[in-house]
Amino acid sequence: MASPSSALNKSSMVQQGRIRVLKEGSTPSGRDAGPVVYWMFRDQRLRDNWALIHAVDQANKANVPVAIAFNLFDQFLGAKARQLGFMLRGLRLLHRDLEQTLQIPLLDSHSGEAIETIPNFLREYGASLLVTDFSPLREVQKWKEEICKRVGKKVSIHEVDAHNIVPTWVASEKLEYSARTIRGKINKLLPEYLIDFPTLQPPSIKWAGTNQSIDWDDLITEVLREGAEVPEIKWCESGENAAVEILMGSKNGFLTKRLKNYSTDRNNPLKPGALSGLSPYLHFGQISAQRCALEAKKNRKNCPQAVDVFLEELIVRRELADNFCFYQPRYNSLQGAWEWARKTLMDHASDKREHIYTKEQLENAQTADPLWNASQLEMVHYGKMHGFMRQIKNICRMYWAKKILEWTRGPEEALAISIYLNDKYEIDGRDPNGYVGCMWSICGVHDQGWQERQIFGKIRYMNYAGCKRKFDVDGYIAHVKRLVTETKKRKAESSLGKEAKELRV
């Protein structure tokens, strides 16, 4: 691959450090230049999108049109109706907004393997430049390496980190040990990268090709049917506008109405409203973390402690997760842990367990621990587990995953089950934050060694009694029972409604 920014014009609207040239093709000019294609997958938004800004900027410089290609990852890491339904509903709104405001087509490159569909798409339209989103996940990195080999010689490929405020490869050139080691590096670069976005205007050359008519209703119906094992959730609406409403809406926006209690209440599972509620939107790229940070900084004078805590989670912790997955290809394996953690876990792998549960028992919340069962049921039925219980966002200790380590045959099985359950049921699963959260709890990643004990070795320990000291455990269990009852009731009513409709037909 070519070195970062080696073929970029210094007058680009996007900072050169945010762009990596994965493949440098020939640079045709005039009539020989082909269109620019933006392969969108991790940052699914129109506003505040550095990758889209770069694609339009490069198209205008070459005097060519620009289009957006989307490849449906229908089998990506076990995503079900819950995740795919949310994503596709957001894309349907994005498709409309792109055509109305920028006159840029969103073209479906069809479901299937990206290593085949994206090169075919580029050949079909004679593209000269492919702009892609950045993801540290190894599957996506491997796809891009293969795509670089499969496209024609004239095609250049640019990767843009529009997901992080400080681009991953700029924040650090190596695997960081902890938040402490990366925090100073990121904070030093924030004045350069935490800037407002330029105004994005429609491309100067309009797309002349045929605009595909995507039947979103059929597509959504299909993924809902195939992924019905994990149904959609009702508590969050998809799309950019919904994301902005959650961030700073006048009715119940995080920054406008709920920010002041964030630093004190975010670790209380009985106060879910204290959390930002932004994680689904950040995961699917329906809102920019940079926009969230910019707006939060405007409120710092009113709530300095809350804003500082929020920015720590939004920037340092999220970007630490991307750093880990980018520089550690075994990010979801015991082999990705530090040597001290691997040793202590293996030293205690054969320790006697009070309980041994199967994956099925854990998935169905069939343990002797009512608190753990409640946290699992909350994730299954609500699509989200409170940060205190799950610790995917590195807010505090993780109870849920640590008990899986305690109740399975060894650390490898515990890690595999925790990732399986997280990716299957969490609306924001299959994410660096999720992998790092599980690795933090079970494998001590980004943590330190603690007092040695059975099963855990030197991995940080957490138990039921500790939770009772920190929050109302019985109240949380009752809260989840009500939530599950309401969810099952709505599901039953929906099924009856469908049956009645079919009978009328």
Image (cartoon, rainbow, N blue to C red):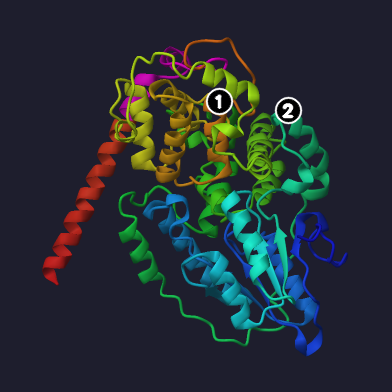
Q: Secondary structure at mark 1?
A: loop
Q: Is residue 245 above or below residue 367?
A: below
Q: Is residue 35 visible?
A: yes
Question: What secondary structure predominates along the stretch shown in magenta?
Answer: helix
Q: Is residue 228 above or below residue 298?
A: below
Outermost residue on the bottom side: it is 31
Q: Is residue 166 visible?
A: no
Q: Secondary structure at mark 2?
A: helix
Q: Quadrant of residue 422?
A: top left
- Judging by the rendered image, the residue that carries numbered circle 2 is 180
Depth check: give the residue in front, 499 or 364: 364
Provide the residue span drawn in magenta: 457-479
- Residue at image location 59% in from the left, 20% down from the top: 343
Label 2 CA crowd tier, 10 Å (few <14, some 14–19, many 20+): few
How many numbered callouts? Answer: 2
Query: In the image, 100: left or right of 215?
Result: right
Depth check: give the residue in front, 190 or 376: 376
**Residue 403 % position (x, y):** 42, 23
> Disc 2 to disc 1, how far (Cα)?
15 Å
- Residue at image location 54% in from the left, 71% down from the top: 117
Q: Amino acid at mark 2?
A: Arg
Q: Earlier in the sequence, mark 2 or mark 1?
A: 2
**Residue 361 % position (x, y):** 29, 31
- Judging by the rendered image, the residue that carries numbered circle 1 is 396
Query: In the image, 280: left or right of 19?
Result: left
Screen quadrant of the N terminus: bottom right
- Residue at image location 53% in from the left, 44% down from the top: 279
Outermost residue on the right side: it is 10
Q: Quadrant of residue 258?
A: top right
Label 1 CA crowd tier, 10 Å (few <14, some 14–19, many 20+): some
